Image (cartoon, rainbow, N blue to C red):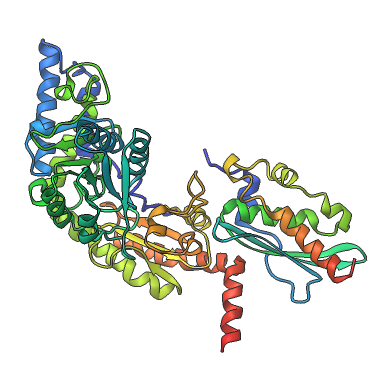
Amino acid sequence: MPIYSDTVMDHFTNPRNVGEIEDADGIGEEGNPVCGDMMTFYIKVDNNHLSDVKFKTFGCGAAIAVSSIVSEMAMGKTIEEARKITPALVAKELEGLPKNKFHCSNLGAQALNKAIDDYLKKQGK
Amino acid sequence: MKRVYLDNVATTSILPEVLEEMLPYLKDAYGNPQSLHEWGDAAREALDDARSKVAALIGAQPEEIIFTGSGTEANNLAIKGLAQARESQGKHIVISAIEHYSVLHTAKTLEKWGFEVTHLPVDKYGLVDPKEAAKSIRDDTVLVSIMHANSEVGTIQPITEIANVVKRNGAVFHTDAVATAGTIPVDVNELGVDALSFAPNQFYGPKGVGALWLKKGVRVIPFLDGGVQEGGRRAGTENVPAIVGMGKAAELATEEMESRMVHLSAIRDKLIGELPSRIEHAILTGHPTQRLPGNASFCIEFIEGESMLMLLSQQGIAVSSGSACTSRALKASHVLTAMGLPPEIAQGSLLFSLGLENTEDDIDYVLAELPPIVDRLRQMSPLYSKFLKGQQGGS
């Protein structure tokens, strides 16, 4: 039996929103290559909404799928709504992650949060 | 879709001749070799025949072969059994830092039993320095175990030189030859070792069987208590079909070794030669020449092994990786880190282990399919964009 769900495989094979945003309003980085996974999220904010979300990820299949689905979940949301995306929610949307991948690969929500923090800091909030 | 199996390090296939030889012992010839009747006689004869063939593969005597359930069990029996049998003489053992887990973790168990373990370092090619080995040996050293070759990076150790050093100091010397026996010439007398582990699922035989060769007169304490099988050193009813398969696989390996090596090194050299010209920042790991004929191992920079492995798998190509994410333990390969590769580079580990069935065509297929996969993952990688920005900044 494959170790990943169909949804993970779909997001891994066809990741959504890969890339960087040149004039991003916020950038968040989480993880490091030593432990295996590293994600960078870029956001554009318009009128308190995430009008664009992009990511770059170094890591395993799960890490790439997590980044992709987080970008999709966050797109168009208000900052408050995006804050509510948790690793548990991400895993649920992906129809589950292998147990040993849950913590190390599931850094998307944290990276997104850091991008929001960065945006708010730049706004002086 | 084309299917290309390049994970012979996990296991090879079973040759049809091997399977044929095994089948009768799974059907009508089901006797127990310990029984004193016709059924037992037939099984015993098969066992003796296999033992001779297996011994011949490594230049040993049949009675020196102990059949086990796997290469892992052979390593366990050697490390635990040889150390325990010499406990009264000393409680220090020496292994290398790049041993298989069945040696590394067994040595950890010995630590719990009060032994002290020295881990010999390796150089950037994965080689143990015989001088370092000599320095590590103390008055209370009872056992040294250094693998013959490492299947993850392909490096073959100078076992004869290390054995000379060990012998001068009176310790017993074991080598894990799972990666080499049946693949390259292995002669226990030339190597000068006292014990040697091997397993046929690395040379086109079945799983569920392995063997420990123990030089005549070398004492070992068995860890399975039971009957008199294998001279009382490995109790339990013999796995006759698997042992018969190991015998046949050993016989074929002895006969065909040279032609197999020629074939494997030709396609290996094609892969090693052409891959770096198609993919920038691909590092060959292991020794450039002292390496297993079927081993082509690389680290592909800026990306991670499991994601490469998965995308290759979607193209029908089966490989393995020593990256943290690929391992259940989520640790980068201890072999690559012992060779001094930084963890982020070790994460890009990609191991092609070639087998008899592979052709030049298979290699061409890999050389065509891998570069776009690497590109795709690099486009996604924050490490790669940092690298590119650094380059621009530098120029």
Estimate the x, y position of residue B380 in percent, counting from the top left: 61, 66
Residue placed most toward the observer, B92 or B151: B92
Estimate the x, y position of residue B224 in percent, counting from the top left: 27, 23
Q: Is residue B99 above or below residue A117?
A: above
* Left or right relative to B371: residue A111: right
Which residue is at 89% across, 70% downward? A124
Whether residue B319 is visible to the viewer of this picture, yes or no, is no
Residue placed most toward the observer, B378 or B114: B114
Whether residue B248 is visible to the viewer of this picture, yes or no, is yes
* Left or right relative to B325: residue B267: left
Which residue is at 73% across, 55% downward? A110
Q: Which quarter of the rendering shows the C terminus of chain B? A: bottom right
Which residue extends farthest bottom? B395
Q: Is residue A89 above or below residue B223?
A: below
Query: Which picture quadrant has residue B26?
Result: top left
Residue placed most toward the observer, B133 or A12: B133
- Mark count: 0
Which residue extends farthest top? B37
* Left or right relative to B156: residue A26: right
Q: Is residue B125 above or below residue B323?
A: below
Residue placed most toward the observer, B279 or B58: B58
Estimate the x, y position of residue B266 in percent, counting from the top left: 24, 64
Which residue is at 36% across, 50% downward? B7
